[in-house]
Amino acid sequence: MTLAAQFEIEYLQYLGPDGKLVGKLPPAVTDAKALLPLFKQMLFVRTFDSKSIALQRTGKLGTYASCLGHEATHVGIGASMQPEDVFAPSYREYGAQFMRGVRPREVLMYWGGDERGNDFAGPKNDYPWCVPIATQCLMAAGAALSFKLRKQDRIAVSCCGDGGSSKTDFYAALNSAGAYTLPLVLCVINNGWAISVPRSAQTGAKTLAQKGLAGGLHCLQVDGNDLIAVLEGMRRATERAHNGEGGSVIEFMTYRLHDHTTADDARRYRGEDEVKAAWTREPMTRLRTFITAEKLWDEAQEKAWLEECGRLVDIEINAYLETPVQPVEAMFDYLYADPPPDLLEQRAAAIALEQRA
């Protein structure tokens, strides 16, 4: 018998669930002090997330997708990109987007049903939120292709979930990246559940990272609750992309500690013991333990920073709540550059109804 091919998927972890260093720090983090601002950003994201859920529960926000438990993965991805790069997110990567300049008030406007929330203050080259899962991966592949054709030293990064990695859009993106050696990083955020469908029910692959092998991409599996591992995984992938070595698929192993969205009740499909076990592996506790042991953080600093986070988030919430609501005809203004005649008729009818109200 002749062996046609064989492969291995490397797994990265530097901080164990107990917050202790496994081995030594990788090239992405040469000094533990560099983790401090990122930990503070993770605390800010968690504060924003908690207050956003409270807004929804009080009827001041529409359906909201919590990012509880994903903070290390999101912040690590955002920290690894350059302003000139392109980010194509799904609808949950707030930590990455905040680091790229998106304002929290814009996130709130989006979930409040206002399309202006997709007009980011951050890099105008980033794509808006994408609810149809994995379609953003193809957009990122297109951006990466344009960078290569224009000989620009830029990369594209896209995020999708474990469910999204089973979509044809994802496979088409990775195939294009492999065929054309594109500077594309596909981040699969594996939180174990595609809404109510467990990972085991939607793919037979042993890892999600290995899906990239079929397209000829570099593949890694990373402990997504370990910020250091996230930074190192992204460092490897982005350097490959910048050096013209092609794309990567990184599977970030994390967990969704909240419901899929505020319209979901995860208790209907996953057990309490599973969630309790996930809390023992969550990213905030392990990083806090590590930087505290390194004498970089203490309870007084955390208390003061959490108070500041609350103040900063409240400013954003008030800005969102004080933003004048758009007129009803605005719903027609974000679909076409040149609306077709029948849509213009509907718009005129909506304006007439509003004037009579």
Image (cartoon, grey):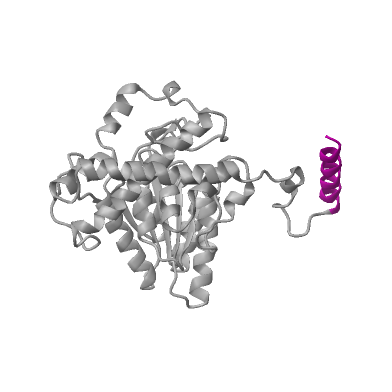
Q: Compared with residue 164, is residue 200 higher up or lower down, i.e. above or below? A: above
Q: What residue do we see at 56% from left, 35% from top? A: 61
Rendered location of residue 148, percent (x, y): 48, 73
Rendered location of residue 45, percent (x, y): 39, 45
| Name of the residue lying farthest toward the bottom | 151
Rendered location of residue 124, percent (x, y): 55, 63
**Whether residue 9 can be seen here:** no
Q: Nearer the viewer, residue 49 or 140?
A: 49
Q: Is residue 166 left or right of residue 11?
A: right
Q: Nearer the viewer, residue 280 or 137?
A: 280
The magenta span reads 341-357
Q: Is residue 299 left or right of residue 92?
A: left
Quadrant location, the C terminus: top right
Number of callouts? 0
Quadrant location, the N terminus: bottom left
Q: Chief secondary structure of the magenta span?
A: helix
Q: Compared with residue 167, is residue 124 higher up or lower down, i.e. above or below? A: below
Rendered location of residue 34, percent (x, y): 24, 58
Q: Is residue 180 left or right of residue 10?
A: right
Q: What residue do we see at 14% from left, 45% from top? A: 20
Q: What residue do we see at 73% from left, 52% from top? A: 333
Q: Nearer the viewer, residue 278 or 301?
A: 301
Q: Is residue 192 magenta?
A: no
Q: Compared with residue 259, is residue 230 higher up or lower down, i.e. above or below? A: below
**Whether residue 83 can be seen here:** yes
